[in-house]
Image (cartoon, rainbow, N blue to C red):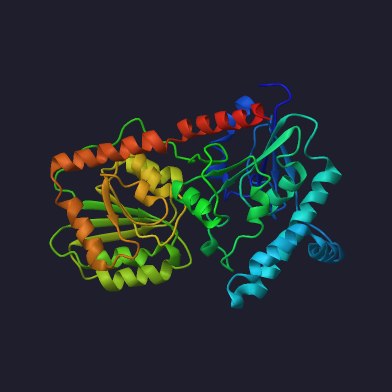
Amino acid sequence: MRDNTNLYLITNDYPYGNAETSFIEPELPYLKEKFNITIISTSLSKEQTEIVDRDIKVVHYTREASILKKIMDSLCYFISKDAYCELADIMHGEKKLIPGRIVQSILFFEEARRFKRFLKKNKVIDDKSKGIVYCYWYTFYCYTVTKLYGTQHSNLNVVTRTHRYDLYDDANQYRRQPFKRQMDSLLKAVVFIAEHGRRYYLERYGLAPDEFKYVLYRLGVEGSSKYVEKAKEGSHFLIVSCAMLIPRKRVELIIEGLSEMTEMNIEWIHFGDGPESIKLETYANKMLGEKKNIKYSFRKEYSAAQIVNFYKENYIDMFITTTKSEGCPVSVQEAMSCGIPIVGTRVAEIPYMIRENGVLLSEDPDAAEIATAIRSVYYATPENIKRMRKTSYELWMKEFNMKQNATRFVNFLLKCEEDN
């Protein structure tokens, strides 16, 4: 470990919740090799749920404040130069969304001020030592630290990742991301998990590409040293999907596509649960229940590790996603790491994940298009199937391999610090 090289990782909840665990924990050992790590969790939860290496310091910001302080911080918005730039930008947007966008901007600013007060009062970040402030999300705490330790600061550089809800306008209730321009000007780098997101950001804010500041470092997933290459004789054509059962994932489209299949024996397994579970199971029973050539099941209690083990131990003919919007879907990466052909919609990063290893659907496919895609994989020659499986695995190995990507990202952070 290098002396006096600090990395302050600010999270939404980790380790006070498990929503980020599968993304953050695999990267931590690589960061720990090169940095002294302090994790600053901004979780609303008061209970630490994840065990962290004892060499990593954990600080918990609970977001607690009196109503009076929240009001005072909100009022400071109206004397801030940044806020005037915000308001000017908001006023040029959709008229009916202006009130909501202003309120959202004020709340964002107020929370950023509260976080600033917490950092200063508790002396959480040592600004006398060289290091990196690494925001895991491009949100209010990123605004705080850019104002405190932005590009003019002599010792610290601020880097942020950005994913989906903190990047795309349509992922936000009021179709706008607060204070992005103000943060961007003070950041050392913005790190994207998907090339689609990087291009969206540059186009949205009219920024020129910068090979150092606007960079792509995918998270990736751990994979397998091998994958199942041959199906058992006489087995069903096995299709899997993996997604939360929510409207955005459009799992009903898979059901509708399967309802078109009459000439082949298919088994479909869906991994995942969610608020639309009962609705979708009822719909599947209606559309597929009478079809003797279709078997289907919803498996809700499987962990990510169990799902990947299922892929490794069984010959999966095809993975399908009909999602409406995404960042860089982990479910697809996991399937690729096991050499599975992919069928997916032309959204977000998925077009970069389907390159001669499956079928790329349109953004809004209908049942007939999905059925055609299934048939194209089903009737592919053994040579083409072997090529698709090999291509899926090689694409994962080259671009979505967690170990490889984590190493590259850590080297990038070290370069940020050296350039300081």
Q: How many marks?
A: 0
Query: From this viewpoint, is residue 107 visible?
Result: no
- In the image, residue 109 sits, relative to residue 395, either above or below, namely below
Q: Position of residue 97 (x, y in %)?
A: 61, 74
Which residue occupies 14% across, 44% down? 233
Which quarter of the image is occupied by the N terminus?
A: top right
User: 17 or 407: which is nearer to us?
Assistant: 407
Query: From this viewpoint, is residue 39 visible?
Result: yes
**Residue 389 vs residue 274: left or right?**
left
**Residue 208 vs residue 111: left or right?**
left
Q: Position of residue 20 (x, y in %)?
A: 57, 47
**Residue 178 vs residue 144: left or right?**
left
Which residue occupies 36% across, 63% down? 251
User: 408 or 23: which is nearer to us?
Assistant: 408
Which quarter of the image is occupied by the C terminus?
A: top right
Q: Position of residue 48 (x, y in %)?
A: 68, 46
| Residue 6 quadrant | top right
**Residue 313 vs residue 416: left or right?**
left
Which residue occupies 65% across, 36% down? 52
